[in-house]
Amino acid sequence: MKLASLREGRDGALCVVSRDLARAVRAGAVAPTLQAALDDWASAEPRLRELAQRLESGRAADAFALDPQALAAPLPRAYQWADASAYLSHLERARRARGAEPPPGYRSDPLLYQGGSDTLQGPRDPIRLGDEAWGADFEAEVGVVLGDVPQGCPAERAGAHVRLLLLVNDVSLRNLIPGELAKGFGFFQSKPSSAFSPVAATPDALGSAWDGRRLHGALEVRRNGALFGAPDAGVDMDFDFPTLIAHAARTRALGAGTLLGSGTVSNRDASRGVACIAERRALELLESGSARTPFLAYGDRVEIELRDAAGASIFGKIDQKVVRVT
């Protein structure tokens, strides 16, 4: 089952989307918003699945053609957005390029930060940038939407709380990060609103691509139409999603609707390309001593997509342009 939110009000209007992403039907009779459905998942899920079956069979009389431009993020605002750094090859390259050691215990203790979740961006929303000197970068990721997770939930039970999966563009302002981290208080200005794929999919809709711990498949990232990288999201993910969920829930419960990101997808095999500019620049520094790839400029276009084994888009495409904000 695939779900999306039409751009209506602050929290969107929930709709069910066909497997091929071509058609949709409003789900307001079940739940007005995705958050409302997640809050009462035991009751809402079977009714949403019935609606999905009617849509697929052509029995949904009020079905309409799906327009990605009309979509907000699946959760236009969420109670919590937390992002990890689950692919250690990304962290190791970045640290090595600037001559820094990885943090102590990074191989056993996941890195996780809490980001802003009050204004999450839709798949066609622009990347609003006030100054190119801030060093705007994209970060292509996989994310999960959780149901209620009890405090202290162990990793072996954490996967049962994954309700949906989706794609993320976690925009970073690289040149603002060092100054913020130097204060010892974490990200804020350097992490503007993240963007999300047109639809979120239940685990069963992903078939063999989802093994209960990782999402497998090439995460295609394009900059201005040219392929930037296609790392496999299921390869070299050192901390899988159940491990990340258990880590996040160690000292507190997680509420339904929590969004948890994987961090930038990265493969140790650099021939697959990378999913962010910073990692490409790190590789350039390590190989030649000079970072040549520029950060995003006004007018640049970023596309992020993951396809199934037959080549069909699973979540739809994140497709954003960088615009000047004054």
Image (tube, rainbow, N blue to C red):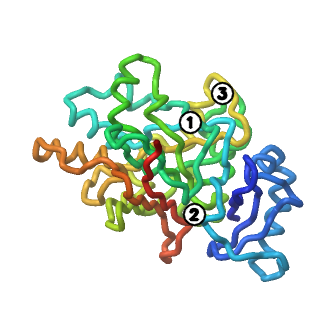
> What numbered label is drawn on residue 82?
1
Q: In the structure shown, which secondary structural element does the residue marked by tag 2 occupy?
A: loop
Say which quarter of the image contains residue 159.
top right
Q: Earlier in the sequence, mark 2 or mark 1?
A: 1
Say which quarter of the image contains residue 247.
top right
- C-alpha distance separating marks 1 and 3: 17 Å
Percent of width and height locating residue 243: 54, 38
> What numbered label is drawn on residue 315?
2
Percent of width and height locating residue 217: 45, 62
Q: In the structure shown, which secondary structural element does the residue marked by tag 1 occupy?
A: strand
Percent of width and height locating residue 302: 41, 58
Q: Is residue 306 above or below residue 9?
A: below
Q: Nearer the viewer, residue 147 or 122?
A: 122
**Amino acid, disc 2:** Phe
> What numbered label is drawn on residue 152?
3
Which quarter of the rendering shows the N terminus? Answer: bottom right
Residue 75 visible to the viewer: yes
- C-alpha distance separating marks 2 and 1: 20 Å
> What numbered label is drawn on residue 28?
none
Callout 1 environment at 10 Å: few (<14), some (14 to 19), or many (20+)? Answer: some
Q: Residue at x 43, y 41 (%)?
A: 130
**Amino acid, disc 3:** Gly
Callout 2 environment at 10 Å: few (<14), some (14 to 19), or many (20+)? Answer: many
- C-alpha distance separating marks 3 and 2: 31 Å
Q: Nearer the viewer, residue 161 or 293?
A: 293
Q: Are marks 3 and 2 in contact (CB under 8 Å)?
A: no
- Camera-nearest label, 3 or 2: 2
Q: Is residue 237 above or below residue 107?
A: below
Q: In the structure shown, which secondary structural element does the residue marked by tag 3 occupy?
A: loop
Percent of width and height locating residue 48: 81, 62
Residue 203 visible to the viewer: no
